[in-house]
Image (spheres, grey):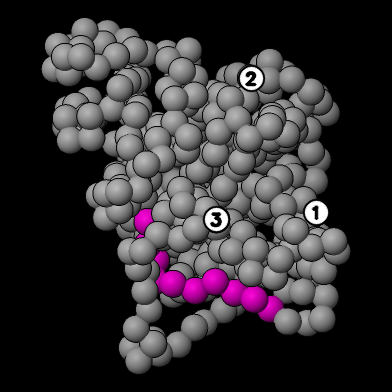
Amino acid sequence: MVSLSLLGSTGSIGVQTLDVTRAEPDGWDVVALGAGRSIDQLVAQAREFHPQMVVVGDPERVTEVQEALPGVTVASGPTALAEASAMGDVVVNGVVGFAGLPVTMAALENGRRLALANKESLIAAGPVVQRVRQTPGAELLPVDSEHCAVHQCLRANDVFTAEAGMERVHRIVLTASGGPFRGRTRSELADVTVEHALAHPTWSMGPKITVDSSTLMNKGLEVIEANELFGMGYDRIEVVIHPQSVVHSMVEYTDGATIAQLSLPDMRLCIGYAMAYPDRIATPFGRIDWAELRRLDFEPPDNEAFPCLELAYAAGRMGETAPALLNAANEVAVQAFLDERIRWTEIPEILETVLGDHDGTEADSLEAVMEIDAKARTTAEQVVASQSNRA
């Protein structure tokens, strides 16, 4: 059996990862679990899967969890996350936000396979992560449905091993569902509520990612991630709106052929792909009934109504720590919206203001990235406060 470390085990990705292990009981041995909140759920998971180590986000609850799980090592903090990440042959990083960066770094530094669902760590610290990807044995498999699709489309054409490689690829096309507000104009979005933004039409995700999907920032972050993962450059990465979420992304080759990956929306397919690669799991998550599938629609994104996508392209083209700046500001702005401190339409305004402060700082070390992240959060909080006072 392959040993598995799962960090972010009580979130959407973590819960679905455990679904995969239940469906494939002879495939993986869960050796480490970690969660920031939902401690009761974490304890229940540990009692079912019997890990050697459990990491909790709140250090004040370590004793409580130790008492509930005799014989299991229970710890907290970045060092504990790094230790847990080094235990598994496969590490699933389902931690939400910038907090997932230590998991990404530790897994790759220890030469593990990283099934990456935490896009923010790669976006914010792309140049730093690229260096540790070169560690012997390290392997990064994307769990996002779009990047998993691109990976499969490239793999199907031997791009990773053929001598011509990426030179045969003309462009990558990422698909977006359009979120709950597809088709609305900018003026029609003025009174969006938290409840509206969390009502995603096709995917079941955590609140932060769901809000990002509603603003198209999730897709913008995926554009930056695609550049980091596949090295295509921003002029060769495009986004189309595809409301059915059946075509998860496409790769167009230089001869005009387009290869797409299709399945019904089910993150367990992507998780299982990353965990089992280069093999495939036997459980058919996302299988399509072709007699029932009636249509596939595509349309361009509305950048006027959803300016976050263009802001992400701009940050990506700036490079260095600009994506880290944007990511941090977005986390602050989204939380402020969820807390009902700002309006939905103010999210891109805050991001544009903070991104305007980018001073060209290089992403030459983890410390530099963390410093710019902290600075961006402070600035974003100040902008949020000014918006709130104005209201």
Which residue appears at 20% of the width and 14% of the height? 71
Q: In the drawing, does residue 67 fall left or right of residue 390? A: left
Residues at marks 2 and 1, CA–CA distance in whole angstroms: 25 Å
Q: In the drawing, does residue 145 fall left or right of residue 235? A: left
Give the structural element (helix, strand or loop) at label 3: loop
Residue 10 in magenta? no
Q: Amino acid at mark 3?
A: Pro
Between 252 and 111, which is closer to the camera in this rendering?
111
Q: Residues within 10 Å of mark 2 (few under 14, many from 20)?
A: many
Q: Residue 152: x and y, percent?
A: 59, 64
Q: Is residue 30 above or below residue 312?
A: above
The circle drawn on residue 233 is 1
Does residue 86 appear anywhere in the picture?
A: yes
Between 161 and 360, which is closer to the camera in this rendering?
161
Which residue appears at 58% of the width and 25% of the height? 110
Q: Residues within 10 Å of mark 1 (few under 14, many from 20)?
A: some
